[in-house]
Amino acid sequence: MTHSLENIFGESAAPLIRAGENKKMSFPHDAVSSWEVFDMSGQKRKSLPQDIPLHAQSLNLQRNKLKRVNGISRFTFLTEINLSRNKILEFPQEMCNLKKLEGLYLNQNNIRTIPEGIFPHLKRLKFLKLSANRLASLPSDINQCTGLVYLDLSKNCLKNIQNLVGLPKLKELSVERNELSELPSQLFQNSACELSVCKATGNPLRCPPEEVCAGGVMDIQSYFQQMEENPNTHSAFTVKTMFLGCSMAGKSTLCRSLKTGKPVAVEAGDRTEGIEISQLYAQGIRFLFWDFAGQEEYYLTHHVFITPRALVILTVDLSSYSIEDPQSFKNQLWFWINNIQLRVPDSVVLLVGTHCDQCKDQQEVMEKKEDITAKVKGMLENRKEVIKQQKRNLEDTLNPSLFADQLDELDCLLEYNLKVLDLIPIDCTKMEDITELRSHILTCIQSESVILCSESILPKSYELVEQAIYALISLREIPQHGIIQLEELSDLILNHVQLSRKSLHSVLKFLLRYLHRIGAIVWYEDISVLSDRVFIHPSFLISMFKTIVRHDLVQQLEGLTRERLMQEGALVKQKFTWVDDLRCRGTLHNAALRILVRRGIEKLVRNEDDLVVEVVGTKREEGVILTLLQHFEVCLPTLVCGSLNPQAPEFIPGKTLWTSAKEAKRDPDGACLFPIYLKDDVVVCQKWGENRQDDLSVHVYFLPEIPHGFFHRLIIKTCSLYSTHWVGRERCLLCCGNRLCLVRQQNSDEDPFIEIRCRRPEKDEGFRPLWDLILAVMSKLFVLSKQWPGLTQQVHTPCPERGCPHYFTWRDWQELDNTDFYNLVKEEKLICKGGHTRRTELIFPKDK
């Protein structure tokens, strides 16, 4: 028996196991025992169904159109009810009669208020999810819900959560993305409190600052203890300001002019390479200026340093901007705004039109400003409308619960609010224009202070430690290059402040996080091999990056002298091999990398042989720079592989196939692949050959588009799984045993997507290994996409029939385990909307 596409994914739930159907719904902490679920989700109901048995214990009514649930009180046996994704305006008063209730989902509604007198009756309630509503306050008696273990209040409008104090069993609390400026200290100081998890990011927190909260409950407790022992103080306002825009758009001129307060001319040969950092103090605000290079080769390292809550100054060269040419808007504005929206979707962007002095007259400037304003507004509105339409498409299926995760992602995208401020035309040769722009920026800071300013209430000890760091810099007790071991930094600080080592440990972690976020220092806490080092001067680290990731790397290699080559024991003839490998294969030899970085270090510091070894590395051990380039997926190192492992099991995603995992290791004396330097896909096309009609093929579509540099980073992630691979600029071929997998980026005027394609197996029992290979790539893709909060994706399998435009849409899959992947579809054959029948394992993962 065959089933149509509608009967498989969304138009009917019959062939699939639906979310929550015939099994217990997802429920943390094992709060409820097993039972039969009455599932009426996604049925567009506007009132409570009348045919629910009064003895029902669990009820799933998510994804309907309920505005109220009159009559719910008659189901007195209910222990769990899911009312998420409805249109409920007020917390149901009748809930107070459900005295056996242990789990309640009311997330993603429109609830604005919760009446008093409900929670004292819900003594058994352990799990409560109220995220994504419009709550501005909490009832005073919510702390009488004494059995509560898990509480999710994220994505509301709460300014105060003091009423939560007194919940004795609360273990997990989420208040992310509200309007909280403070957390109540009593939540963390009560010795009887069991709170172990507190998520509070996305709030304008001053007490404790967000960096303290990022460290977890123990760091929050330490903060409040310090606040009791030391009088509190306010930190200065700090605003990270990022200058972005195309090459030669005037970013450096503008940045330096703002810093000095007067026009500064920047020669063409003095343009930014990589990133330049400077500071400006104005009216009690500290600006950290980050000037990002505009050449394409540098884009891949920008993501390492771009952080949320920043003011973005996007420069536009008005003299070269063309109203008539759509490509002009796309290159100078659309590309940058779109990438900002994908990466840091809650930013504030100030448009600055430069080179006004090179325009014909003031009328031309104003016409271009009006054109840019209208097109940016249309761009942002269109993006919102596309997301809303995509949401409607999923909601209009007969079983939208299959797409719950995708709908959640779309809701998140709609909640983001990138602010693009009006364009300010400027002539950087005029003193009055520079003065006026500085004044305008200060006005923007004041109006957008909640988003942009880093103001914190800090114990005196925190301020003393920060001052000690700057004192150590001025006294030159910290090396000129600024790279210092964390333990050594602690010892130096203890010589300047009266703190115990234990107290300093907690304080220092917060300060390093805080200074890292605002861009004053760099500390990679999440990179285990680098977490013991602090980069006090980010500019030094950036200088190291730009010795390798640069637009003229080939010329830099060609210019290496014989004396430089001899430092690595290399011959001049080897240099020509390095240049050829870089040009033809995108490969940079580690010896060449070490020479280039060594030369860059010697330009900045003298007589620092130990530093050179630490940063550059040796033939036996890789240095800091190579570790960072690999961690941020800028390059892929060659591996030293041992002998074949005859006992290796069948391929399992994430595990080594051909060699023992212990035997495969990086080769410091080898080379690194930099996909950004590849020019074509010739080698991949030769190895793969022509596409075949019966190939297994999956398309991953991105909304609104594939981020710049995404595919190159995906190549590095996937190639790290397999020792045999061929890589091109927009294609990659992976080899797993005798199986090949093609991964390619498809850019066109239509919807851009990434395709994952495998050859159909010769034997029917060979489908499972191929789908394992495809799913391994999809898993890496999904993990990588999380680094772009403003991005969402859909997965389709095109109909294999030649010329057929129809496709099969994947339901939510990211959270499924390896077994569930193969239970997506039960049917032996599928029919597309065009009437073409195909075996299921050609379309989706399926167990035989």
Image: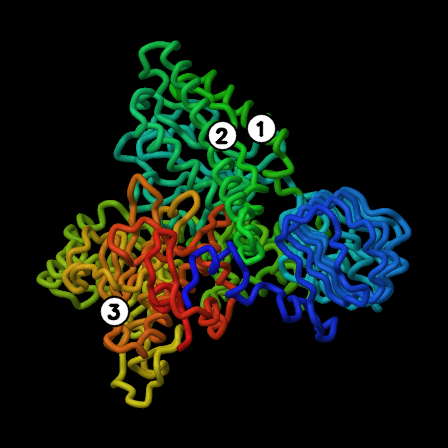
Residue underneath mark 3: 740
For the point 73% across and 75% down, which residue is it? 33
Residue underneath mark 1: 444
Quadrant where the C terminus sits is bottom left
- Tell me whether circle 3 and circle 2 mark residues in contact (CB < 8 Å): no
Cα separation, mark 3 vs mark 2, equals 47 Å
Quadrant where the N terminus sits is bottom left
Q: Residues within 10 Å of mark 2 (few under 14, many from 20)?
A: many
> Residue 276 bears which disc, if any?
none
Residue 724 position (above or below residue 105): below
For the point 52% across and 25% down, which residue is it? 438
The earlier-in-sequence mark between 1 and 2 is 2
The earlier-in-sequence mark between 3 and 2 is 2
Residue 146 position (above or below residue 256): below
**Residue type (three-letter) at the residue carrying disc 3:** Leu
Which mark is in front, 3 or 1?
3
For the point 29% across and 87% down, which residue is it? 645
Question: Which element type, helix, strand or loop, lies under badge 3?
Answer: strand
Q: Nearer the viewer, residue 469 or 716?
A: 716
Which mark is in front, 3 or 2?
3
